[in-house]
Image: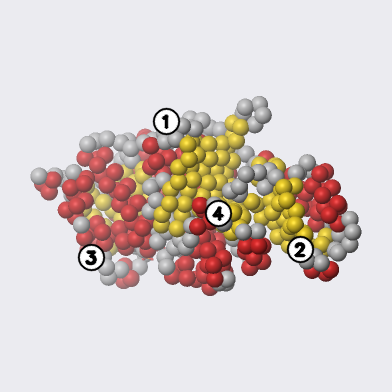
Amino acid sequence: MIEDREPIRVALLGCGTVGTEVVSLLQGRPGEFAARTGAPLQVTGVAVRRPHKHPEVPEHLLTTDAAALVNGDVDVVVELIGGIEPARSLLLQALRAGKSVVTANKALLAEYGSELYAAADAAGADIYFEASVAGAIPLLRPLRESLAGDRISRVMGIVNGTTNYILSAMDSSGASYAETLEEAGQLGYAEADPTADVDGFDAAAKAAILASLSFHTRVTATDVHREGISGIGAGDIAAAKSLDRTVKLLSICERVVDDEGNESVSARVHPAMIPRSHPLAGVGGAFNAVFVEAESAGQLMFYGQGAGGVPTSSAVLGDLVAVARNLVVAGKGPRESAHAQLPVRSMGATPTRYHISLDVADKPGVLSQVAATFNEHDVSIAAVRQQGRGPDASLVVITHTALDSALQATVDEIARLSAVNEVVSVMRVEGEQS
Ligand code: NDP
Ligand code: HSE
C-alpha cells in the first residue's frame, strides 16, 4: 500500500503568487500525488516573511525561519522565494545535506546554476527547475532530456509574459505602457521588482538557462546581451504596423559557426520587429512561445502560459513528482552538461538586421549620403522607403544581415550627417529571410 510507505517530506520556501497554488494543490489532492509518486507527499512546513498574511496555510506549518525548516527532517526543498539571497544559501544548505531541490528561480540559476549543480552532484541530490523558464510550458525537460541526443542550433522566442502582455496591449488597443505594467503586476505576472521584466533582466536570465542547456556550455546572465522595452513608444509600434510588422521582446540563443568552422554561442534579448504573418506575432497577453531548431529533429515549437501562479504551479508540481519518484526508486535526474564549453560571442560580433527610421532634410542628395554611409560600413540595404515631403520627410531603411557592430557604427555615423535631422528609431528585425 502506497499510504503505508514512508512519506516524502517537502519543505516549501515562499508562498506568494506561485507558492499559494502549489500548497493548495498539494493539500487538496494528496491521494493523486501519492499514486503518481509511489509515496505520500507530506508538507512539513511553509517559510514566509509575514505569517499573518497567509490564512490559507494551516498555522502549524507556517514559519519565518526558513533555514531551520531546511535543516529539519525534509527530503525535498521547493524554493519559491525568488532573488539571490537568501534563496542561494538555503538551497546550497539543502543540497549539501543531500536534500533534493525544486526551484522556479531563474535569476539564481542564471548566476549560480553551476554552483548549485556541483553541490547537487557532490551530494547525489536532484535539482529540477522547469518553472524557471516559460511558466507552464514543458521546455527545459525536452531540452535537457528529450533532445540530449541531438544538436540544437537555435532557440528563439518570447519568454517574458509581462513584457509580452504590455507590448500586445500597446499593439492592439494603443494602451499606455505604465497602465498595462500595473495590470500585469496585479495579475501576478510581474516579478517582485518589475524592472526585472521591463529592462529584460528576467528574459536574459531565461536566455542564459536556455543557452546553457541547448549548447552544453555555461552561459550566465552577464553573457547575455540585454535590452528591455522601456524605450519602446507608440511611435515604434506605429512604425512596425505601417510595415505590417509587430514588436516583440525576443530571447535568441544561437550556435554560430564562422568561416573557419569554429563554433561559438550567442545569447541576446532585445525588442525586434517581426512580420505579422510570423507565428510569434500571434502570441498575445502573458503567453510565451519558443522555437527550437535542432539538426535531426528540425523545427519544434513550444507554446503556452508563460506566467501566473496557477500555470506555473503545474511546472513546479511536475518537478516535485519527478524528484519524489527518483527518491522512491533511489534514482537521480540529469546532471549539468557543460562539456562543450563553447566561447560566448559579444553582441557586436553577432549577425543581425536593423530597421532604421530617419527624420531627414527635404533636399536633393539625402538618399545618396545615407546609402554611401551604409556602403562604407559594408552593410547592404534590403529596402528603403521615403515617407512624406517637406519638413515631415522621413526615410525608413531595412538592412540585410550584418555584424551588429557594423550596423551600430552605421547608425552612429548617419546621426552625424547634415542631411539627417534625427534618428527616430532603430530596431532589430527578426523572423524573415535576410
Ligand atoms: P512572490 O513575490 O509572490 O512570493 C514570494 C514569497 O516568498 C512570499 O510568500 C514571501 O513571503 C516569501 N519570502 C520572501 N522573502 C522570504 C524570506 N527571506 N524567507 C521566507 N520567505 C520569504 O513571488 P512569486 O510567487 O511570483 O515568484 C516566486 C518565484 O517563482 C520567483 O523566483 C519567480 O521568478 C518565479 N516565477 C514566478 C512566476 C510568476 O508568474 N509569478 C512564473 C515563473 C517563475 P510573504 O508572502 O510573507 O511576503
Ligand atoms: N515575471 C515573469 C514573466 C514570470 O513575466 O514572464 C514568469 O517567469
**Left or right of 403, for residue 303:** left
Q: State the quadrant of the C terminus.
A: top right
User: Which amino acid lies under the numbered mark 2 shown in the image of this protein?
Assistant: Gln
Residue 198: image location, x then y, percent: 55, 61
Question: In the picture shown, does residue 179 fall above or below 31?
Answer: below
Mark with earlier residue (2, 1): 1
Residue at image location 55% in from the left, 54% down from the top: 277
Mark with earlier residue (1, 4): 1
Measure the C-alpha gap from mark 4 to mark 3: 50 Å
Residue at image location 84% in from the left, 47% down from the top: 372
User: Residue 58 got which mark?
Assistant: 3
Q: Which residue is mark 1?
A: 149
Contact between marks 3 and 2 (CB within 8 A): the answer is: no
Label 4 SS: loop
Measure the C-alpha gap from mark 1 to mark 3: 45 Å
Residue 191: image location, x then y, percent: 47, 61
Q: Which residue is mark 2?
A: 387
User: Which amino acid lies under the numbered mark 4 shown in the image of this protein?
Assistant: Ser
Residue 42: image location, x then y, percent: 21, 53
Measure the C-alpha gap from mark 4 to mark 2: 24 Å
Q: Would the CB of label 3 be found within 8 Å of ligand 1?
A: no
User: Which amino acid lies under the numbered mark 3 shown in the image of this protein?
Assistant: Pro
Q: Which residue is mark 4?
A: 277
Question: In the picture shown, does residue 139 fall above or below 161?
Answer: above
Mark with earlier residue (3, 2): 3
- Badge 1 crowding class, 10 Å Cα cut-off, few under 14, some 14 to 19, many 20 or more, is few
Mark with earlier residue (4, 3): 3
Q: Nearer the viewer, residue 299 or 277?
A: 277
